[in-house]
Image: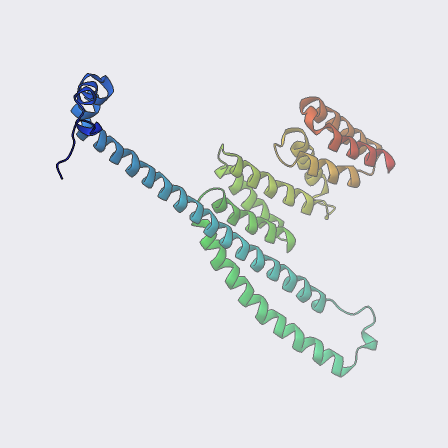
Amino acid sequence: MEQNTSHDIFTDPALVKAKQDDPFFKYINSNWREILMMAAILLGGYYVVTRLQQSYYQSKVASADVLKKAQDSFSEVVALQNRLFTLSQPLADPTKETKESKETREKEKGEVEGKLRAAKSGLVQRLAALADQKSPYLSMAPLFDATLSAVTGNLQAAQTAVDDLKGKQSSDQGGILVSELGRLGLARAKLDAASTKSEGFKELLTLLEGGEFVSVSAASTLARVASTDEEKGLVKAAIESRIAKSPHQTDLLQNELIALGAQ
């Protein structure tokens, strides 16, 4: 059967002429190679960006996992350290301790010492891995060192670690947060000893007045440890100054003023 081309829209002279007169069609027809190349570049760029974002996310997940493991090791070391301290303390009434109970205590003490050595070794390895991560995770390693030293009563080592944190503190929020957390922990540890209590008190006042992240925590501690009228006056003035500087923290800081007045 002979094809009737009179009604074939694809060979309609009017349609052919319309395509030839269409500026958009002329542009596509003349620049199709460049358009295809640009499309390929855009698709390639999208693929690269997507892969970079995926890689960044996976890196963050891996860093968070390293941090969690370091936290677990740290908690284990602190728990074992506290248990060893308890086992090492003399009994209030040594005459009540039997030979069997003493042997049992010495045996447990030896076991705890062995576990503590292993836990500290694991913590050192995990902190080394944490120090290899990207910011802010890498800054967490010296924070753990400072906190562990403070918990175990080695305030000089804790001070060195905190000073190191302050020296390496970057302008990014993560670095500032880690540094302030280290200073907060050390200041609280200093409150436990009469010889360093005033130093800890002054550092907490500094953090209350100038800290970016821990001002409320510092205020909470100060409101509960201030015992003299002079100390309470200093804390009250610092809290009121902070409220004037950071009105958005008013509700939280007002609670500390109430706690301070309730003592």
Which sits in the foreground, 198 or 78?
78
The picture quadrant where one finds residue 235 is top right
Name the spot of residue 51 as percent of width and height, x first: 36, 44
Give the vertical position of 96 relative to 18 (above or below). below
**Can you say which quadrant of the picture contains the C terminus?**
top right
Residue at the spot x=66%, y=72% of the render? 109
**In the rendered image of this protein, does residue 238 appear above or below residue 18?**
below
Q: Which colour scheme is used?
A: rainbow
Number of numbered callouts drawn: 0
Left/right placement of residue 61 relative to residue 105 reads left
Give the residue displayed 64% in from the left and 45% down from the top. 185
Residue extending farthest to the front is 1
Quadrant the N terminus occupies: top left
Q: Which residue is drawn at 73% across and 78% down?
A: 102
Q: Which residue is drawn at 70% across and 24% down?
A: 247
Counting from the top left corner in percent of width and height, residue 168 is at: 48, 39
Q: Where is residue 99 in the image (x, y as percent from the top left)?
A: 75, 83
Pick out the residue farthest to the bottom: 100
From this viewpoint, is residue 133 visible? no
Q: Which of 117 and 16 is in front in this view?
A: 16
Q: Which of 236 and 13 is in front in this view?
A: 13
Where residue 57 sits in the image (x, y, percent)?
44, 45
Q: Is residue 250 visible?
A: yes
Residue lying furthest left in this view? 2
Q: Of residues 53 and 188, which is closer to you in this image?
A: 53
